[in-house]
Image: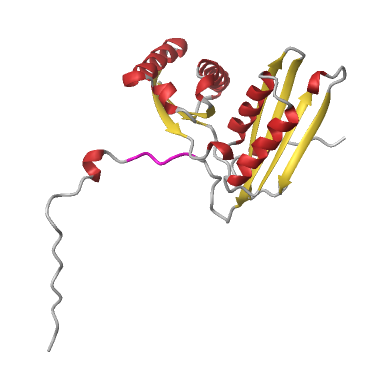
């Protein structure tokens, strides 16, 4: 029976970047890997309402830089930056290292597989019919400009006695094409009948050699001081003509 490999892990180093970037000695490697896993689990659980797409971790000496890619940056930052400062202090105390945190907003939430899967899981927990939730998610995602989407839900669907899997697909999902930018997300819905797993694949298009996968984040805005133009009307430069 054929099994599907993880689309993002399959493409890491080819078109997908690493979500953890650091170098370590052999004796420290396992400690850093376990620490990264704990950090992601802790932040994801604490900021679940903010719609966390991914958490990028970079290390340099004893400094750890965490970039949180979220659909709702206001929830992460908090009023006057209080929320992010409390998070930074708690994470630094948790791992006993110097921590800095950056927050980046997702550009298109309907084109992010992780956010789409979590949204479907949330609807299932509210007892919305799974077929309706999948159909609405596909319509929103296809309107965002992607080339294909596939959604699969597994569990006691509709309260059935026997668990099963159902899936719907629209467009193309080329899983074996390494230059295909395929995003993948997974979430679980806790219902009164048990857990229901939700998997989402989104195909954003083929990449040319040298291109990297779409990170789907908004560019950071420049400071207001840099955007302001100097006063006065720009004069046209005189053009000298030879007679």
Q: Residue at x 27, y 38 (%)?
A: 223
Q: Is 157 or 13 nearer to us in this picture?
A: 157
Residue 164 picture quarter: top right
Q: Can residue 69 be seen in this snapshot?
A: yes
Residue 220 image position (x, y, % from top left): 37, 39
Q: Quadrant of the N terminus?
A: top right
Above or below residue 207? Residue 9 is above
Q: Quadrant of the C terminus?
A: bottom left
Residue 3 picture quarter: top right
Residue 129 image position (x, y, % from top left): 73, 26
For residue 99, side relative to residue 207 (left or right)? left
Q: Is 229 or 36 nearer to us in this picture?
A: 229
Q: Is 18 or 130 nearer to us in this picture?
A: 130
Magenta residue check for 220: yes
Above or below residue 40? Residue 226 is below
Magenta residues: mostly which secondary structure?
Answer: loop
Q: Residue at x 58, y 48 (%)?
A: 145
Q: Residue at x 58, y 40 (%)?
A: 111
Q: Can residue 58 be seen in this snapshot?
A: no
Magenta residue check for 139: no
- The span picked out in magenta is 217-221
Residue 195 image position (x, y, % from top left): 73, 17
Q: Residue at x 70, y 20 (%)?
A: 127
């Amino acid at each position: 029976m054929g099994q599907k490999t993880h689309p993002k892990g399959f493409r890491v180093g080819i078109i997908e970047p690493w979500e953890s970037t650091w170098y370590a000695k052999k004796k420290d490697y396992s400690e850093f890997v376990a620490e990264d896993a704990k950090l992601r689990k802790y932040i994801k659980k604490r900021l679940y309402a903010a719609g966390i797409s991914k958490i990028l971790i970079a290390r340099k000496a004893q400094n750890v830089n965490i970039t949180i890619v979220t659909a709702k940056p206001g929830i992460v930052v908090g009023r006057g930056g209080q929320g992010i400062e409390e998070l930074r202090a708690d994470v630094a105390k948790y791992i006993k290292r110097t921590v800095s945190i950056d927050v980046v907003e997702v550009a298109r939430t309907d084109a992010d597989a992780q956010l789409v899967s979590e949204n479907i899981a949330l609807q299932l927990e509210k007892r919305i019919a799974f077929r309706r939730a999948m159909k609405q998610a596909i319509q929103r995602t296809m309107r965002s400009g992607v080339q294909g989407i596939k959604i699969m839900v597994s569990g006691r669907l509709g309260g059935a006695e026997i668990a099963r899997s159902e899936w719907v697909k629209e467009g193309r999902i080329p899983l074996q094409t390494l230059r295909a930018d395929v995003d993948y997300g997974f979430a679980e819905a806790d219902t009164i009948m048990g857990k229901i797993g939700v998997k989402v694949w989104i195909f954003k298009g083929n990449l040319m050699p040298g291109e990297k996968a779409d990170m789907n984040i908004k560019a950071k805005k420049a400071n207001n001081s840099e955007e302001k133009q100097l006063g006065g009307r720009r004069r046209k430069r005189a053009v000298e003509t030879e007679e």
